[in-house]
Amino acid sequence: MLKERLLQRLAQRQERKPKLLFVDAQPLSKHARLGLPLYSRFIEKATGISRITVVNLAEKGKLPDDPSQYDGIVFGGSKHDLREKLKWMEDEQGFMEAATKAQVPILAFCFGHQLYGALYGGELSELRDKVVGYKTVTKTDAGKRHPLLRRLRKSFLLAASHKYYFEKTPSDSSDIIATEIADGDPPNAIIEYTNKDGKHLALTTQLHPELANAIPAFASATDKEKPTMDGILIVDRRTLRRYSKRAEKAGRRLVRNWVKQQVIPHARSRAVS
């Protein structure tokens, strides 16, 4: 009898933990080819949340009908770009819009950042060469005291792996307001989206706060993508590891700020209702 009660309490405690959906747009073969864990493992480590449902759109995964069953939704990066206009990209954007209307907290990296911003008028430009390495981002005036950037320095490092960026900032509409809270190269590095009443809707970044430790593997996969720090080639492994640790620390802080300030309160409000 006692054992049954303990198991029941453990099950109830597990149910109270936040539940994330990770929408993966990266083919499984890419991480496997580099000898890396599944992308979802990086998300679990960055967020500190183990209750994660994974839908891989690049592997013909199916999005759930109702985004409101989750306490937060993470949209990852991809080797694909928006200009390919694949069917699953249209589906993903539609799901983003539905999650936004349901006010489920959203976190989006790189491709996810571009896809979300395109919903609200953001326009992409292409870099001459793909960036792989680390980038310095700096808090804007709006970001200096922003809670989502709490305990982060005025300027900090994040991992980067991209060839496209927002040339034009997503436009404010009557319902959605986009605020750049950190800038850098590329511009519009970190954006918070809110509704007209100031309610948080999404945190998106062109960079990869979740993949700092994967950059050495990405860079070693091809001679064309050598790791750089703000455009300067990183020539030795010790320096690469130092940048990796700094970017991992900042990236985890950014992601966990989002979890603590948006996901956990949303989970509690769902549990009460």
Image (cartoon, helix red, strand yellow):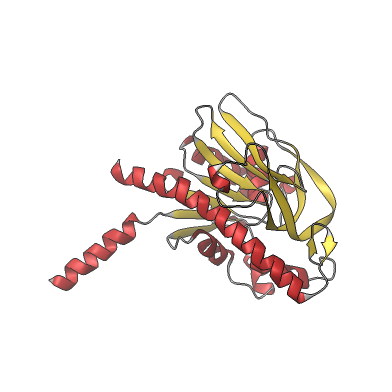
Q: Which residue is drawn at 66% across and 63% down?
A: 246
Whether residue 36 is visible to the viewer of this picture, yes or no, is yes
Does 12 sit above or below residue 192? below
Q: Residue at x 46, y 46 (%)?
A: 261
Estimate the x, y position of residue 121 in percent, counting from the top left: 69, 33
Give residue 97's quadrant in the image.
Answer: top right
Estimate the x, y position of residue 100 in percent, counting from the top left: 51, 38
Residue lying farthest to the left in this orientation? 1
Which residue is nearer to you in this view: 64 or 236? Answer: 236
Whether residue 66 is visible to the viewer of this picture, yes or no, is no
- Residue 270 shown left or right of residue 240 in the figure: left
Does 192 sit above or below residue 84? above
Q: Residue at x 55, y 34 (%)?
A: 194
Which quarter of the rendering shows the C terminus?
top left
Give residue 219's quadrant in the image.
Answer: bottom right
Counting the numbered discs, the total is 0
Which residue is nearer to you in this view: 232 or 132? Answer: 232
Estimate the x, y position of residue 247 in percent, counting from the top left: 66, 61
Estimate the x, y position of residue 54 in percent, counting from the top left: 50, 59
Which residue is nearer to you in this view: 105 or 239? Answer: 239
Residue lying farthest to the top in this orientation? 174
Q: Which residue is drawn at 67% across and 50% down?
A: 111
Residue lying farthest to the right in this orientation? 128
- Residue 65 shown left or right of residue 61 in the figure: left
